Image (cartoon, coloured by chain):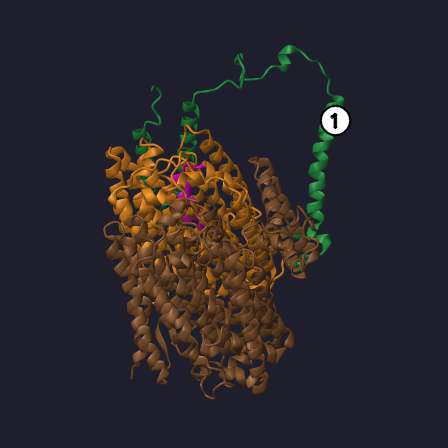
Amino acid sequence: MIHLLQANISTSAPSSYLPIGLQIAFAAGLVALLMVLTHLLGPRRKTSDKLQNFTSGIESHGDARQPMAIKYFLTAILFVLFDVEVIFFYPYAVNFKELGWAGFGAVLMFVGFFLCGFIYIIKKGALKWED
Amino acid sequence: MNALVLSAILGVVMMFSGILLKRPAAIRSVAIIGLLLLLASNMLDMSGTRFFSINLGDFLHFDRFAFLFNSVAIFCVLVYVLLTGKAIERVGVKNYADYFALFFFVLCGIFLVTSFQSLLILFLGIEIITIPLYILTGSDKRNLKSNEASLKYFLMGAFSTGLMLMGIALIYGAQGTFAIEKFNLLKIPGSPLMIAGMLLMLFSMAFKVSAAPLHFWTPDVYDGAPTVFTSFMATVVKAAVFIGFIRLFENAFGLLQPTWQLWVALMAAATLFVGNITAVFQQSVKRMLAYSSIAQAGFMMLAIFALNGDAKEGLLLYGAAYSLATIGIFSVLSRMDDYSYESFNGLAARQPLVAATLTIFLLSLAGIPLTAGFLAKFYMIKAVVATGSNLWLVVFALLMAAVSVYYYFRVIQAMYFREAGEHSASFQEPGKGFKWVLVLVAALIIALGLFPSLLLNWLYF
Amino acid sequence: MKNALQLAYLIPLFPLLGFLLNGLGRKYFSKSLIGTIGSGAILASFAVSLWVFFQVKSGNTHVAHYFNFISVGDLKIPFAFQIDQLSSLFLLIITGIGFLIHLYSTAYMHDEKPEHFGRYFAYLNLFVFSMLLLVMGANFVIMFIGWEGVGLCSYLLIGFWFRKEEYNKAASKAFIMNRIGDLAFLIALFWLINKTGTVTFLEVFSAESLSKLSDRDITVITALLFVGATGKSAQIPLYTWLPDAMAGPTPVSALIHAATMVTAGIYMIARSNVLYSMAPAVMTVIAIVGLATALLAATIALKQNDIKKVLAYSTVSQLGYMFLALGTGSYVAAVFHVMTHAFFKALMFLGSGSVIHAMGGEQDIRKMGGLSKYMKITNITFLVGCLAIAGIPGLSGFFSKDEILAGAFATSPVFYAIGLFTALLTAFYMFRLYATTFRGSFRGTHEQEHHLHESPAAMTIPLIVLAVLSIVGGYVGVPEFIAAGAHSLKDFLYPVFEPSYKILQEHHVSHETEWGLTIGSTIAILAVVIYAWTRFSKKPDLAEPQGLGKVLANKWYVDEIYDAVIVKPLNKLGALLNNIVETKVIDGIVNGVGRLVNYGGRQLRWVQSGQVGLYVLLMVLSMIVIFVLQFFFRK
């Protein structure tokens, strides 16, 4: 099954996989070693403070598994969606000159669709916090 | 290209129509007009009138076969909207327009899948098709079954997407390109990387068309989804993915046929077996139709197996015949409040016209002569026979087709040979328009059963 | 120049129109209008058939090509009709008898509601349409379309009175048994396409394409086609549907289960006679299956008490005869018997319908008796039918049966002996039926006796016409040894079977032997007839049968075996005759497959548990299996 990984038939000698093998062995070995070491070397003192969840210094209260309003998720997901779309602007900004008017047209279209989506979610009331 | 762009725009239009228009009938009219426009623009494209001239590079290539199938798909969606559009209101009036928007987006994905030239576009198309389907499956929000089906579909769909991506990655590793035209299979035909990638692609496509042994999601999802949307998923979408399937295996992996042919044959046989045998034992017509869709997929797999001219023509005919008939049956089913066989008892006496057209649809699915279904099956079998070997597959397929008669006829028997009793479900009185469309579809199925060239001649001129 | 026979499309067109009119308008038309449309359509196609027949008789045969039905790659399947001697003869039988039965039905079904009346005639016309397609088709595909069509219509018509559950079961049984046969037909069809690349009769049977077929191909194809024929023409092991199919209205039994549909298998083999003549092993199998069916069905008929069941088993038996004729190479005799049998069996079924009509739905002959006093025309015509089927000299059945027996004798005296024995049984049970029904004294209730009457003219006229045909129908095939050159049917059909005659060497039996055989068998039959007549007129056997009689009355328990062969092996059947064992083995396999399917279905359903984890696990496992096989076990 080792051939599964081979990319080029001309360099299929097993020796050419040596670096990869070494790297895998090193990575796995390092992880194992560190885990074992911390387990063996670290001092262990259990206090109730240490077992608590760390939430940026804010005191936690209640159970993490209590139901949350769906609004949080909706807003979060919409944020991610639009955030990711904005990322497209970065490469465009870098290549602004090279792409010229055609590029401008394309991005305008993109923004147009983008805007449609934005208007749509507002009209649908997805961002309305109060019912 | 016309239809591709237009479908995306129409999807957006539908989204906003829900905000601007309040009456469902108005929204439906917009959708129907949109579909007619789409059909017209696609036909124009086929006859050489292009609205856009864009260098598609290695990404897309529109050929006659793709155009023709796109027209069939648009037409089927049109029929579907005409027949079931009103029943969708029962799922939810609030988001009524959004469902139609999703149909247009799915169509957009279909156009990509039927004419992709690069594995990236294939992936994109498949995802554009499936993501709206996850939503449609779960659209009946108050119904736990619908929720469960949606989640299951999503989980397993994500699994198959993973397979496909892994396959594409491996193939890229082997070939150094996504463009299927540039694949060089002669130089290194048996590269394990390529074969592993190809098998992964085979699995993920088999998942999408619900071929065994990757069919497990189908019955649960089709059964759980609102009936109106099952109709959509099980017909147009499935046929379209098949077109992508055959395109992938013909243009990209055609030279590797000796390697994959056996697996496709075994999958086809397994699909036929599982679909037909399990369908026999179902007590609900809806679930029976879910298994029947698996069984029909098994028949369509034969086209992939044979992969010759007959097979491609046959697949087109099969897709049209199967989709139209199944849409028709589901449209009747979605007007009933119970899906057991008993609920069809005595339907012939109460709704003679509906029962008669339903009988034609069922006969077509069962492959009885003089219907499009028979010719479609005939083309498939003929294609396999033309490969010259594997007669066992032919015999097995025919045997399974014979089994299928049993469960399709149970419905006919209930409608005609049984009296309406306490089990008979109430049937929403259909309007004149509904009946006319049903008759039209039935007539079309018979016409295609007599003159398949009505459809297939479009391939050549 | 266009051949006038291009107009042959009119023949199936009329019934199709009749079907559409009656099917769509059945709610608005009056009963008399429906009856007129239904019968008129068949009468019109009968008129065209007559014209076609005389065209053919004057030497004009033609393949009428209309359009290309299917064209896949090199394979072109035209929608075409082949009008030749064989098909024109069948056309006459189908439309002629079909018309009489339609006419009869207008009276017989008169008590139905107009809507059902319309449905009935629509189905009947559709059936005739399919049968015409079957016979006229110029290739196996058109034939298959008709083949499926008749199966479907028969399903609809058997289940016509769908309020009774058992009728539904009978309809399903008929359809499923037919489907098994159809499956074999389809496989043969694709085999033929694969080897010769054509399905058109004229091309398949040409020397060029026959040379492409190896002996093995021919044997397999003919054997598969024969399996198809056993389904449609009710032969062992697929015959049990036919007696059950008597659930339908009586005219339907007459049309479908006596005169037309069941002869489809005979027609198909006669059409493909060249292929069969090249496969002697299959011919022998056909002869043996035919003979076994004839004997088995005749013994069962001995003890049946339902008037229609007796006729049904007699049909199965007579079909066995026809297969015997095909198997021994006497194709003409088979076609001849199809024709005469169509006359007298339709006559008897319609006669029995007349009786049932008069008895107010009663079908048990033990409750009849002495009906000759009340129903003169029915009595006389039914008697004619019985005499014809028994093979009394001078009537049609005599000539065709004699020709079959002569052919059997030429092949093997054993065939002849069994065939003759079956003929004696036939004479016996037919006259048992006749005497019990029409002779002696009436055994029904007083009320029934009061109600007894002769049927209306629309029912008696077809009876009279059929009776006349049953008498004179045989004179188209007077055997050589009685009058040289008088077998006009043989001369007429000669071109169809000519290629076979070249392949088969003819066994000649001297005229003296034939005379001897004929006289001997006639005397035996007459003796049986007189014995049965006198015995059952005086003392009809009303008691529950015992011993072997009970076995016969229960149809050799074949139905029970079909249902429970694995559950109760060898239970009450140990002492029965050999052919039971045969059916048992066959059914064991059939049922075993059924159980396997059942079991497999259950297991598959269990797998569909709804657990996503299990699904994904199964998918991954199957993928791993494929990967392992691909990379480690395939080159």
Query: Where is C449 relative to B155, above or below?
Result: below
Residue C197 visible here:
no
Residue B177 spot, x, y in % from top left: 52, 55
Q: Nearer the viewer, residue B247 or C478?
A: C478
Q: Quadrant of the C terminus of chain A?
A: top left
Residue A79 falls inside the magenta stretch:
no
Q: Quickly name the residue at label 1.
A: A37
Q: Is residue B234 highlighted in magenta? A: yes
Which residue is drawn at the image coordinates 44% and 48% (left, top)?
A: C444
**Looking at the rendering, which quadrant does residue B44 occupy?**
bottom left
User: Number of numbered discs present?
Assistant: 1
Residue nearest the observer in this picture, C499 or B287: C499
Task: For chain B, give the colour.
Answer: orange
Q: Colour of chain A?
A: green
Toward the viewer: A96 or C367? C367
- The answer to whether residue C102 of the structure is visible from this angle is yes
Q: For the magenta stretch, what is the residue range?
A: B225-238
Q: Nearer the viewer, residue B302 or C33?
A: C33
Q: Colour of chain C?
A: brown
Name the chain under label 1: A
The answer to whether residue C587 is left or right of residue C429 is: right
> Residue C235: image x %, image y %?
55, 63
Q: At 41% across and 47% down in the image, what residue appears?
A: C162
Horizontal relation, residue A117 to residue B279: left or right: left
Kindly report the secondary structure that dominates the magenta region of the rendered protein. Answer: helix
Q: Amino acid at mark 1?
A: Leu
Q: Secondary structure at mark 1?
A: helix
Location of residue C90 in the rendering, given as x and y in whole percent from the top left corner:
41, 72
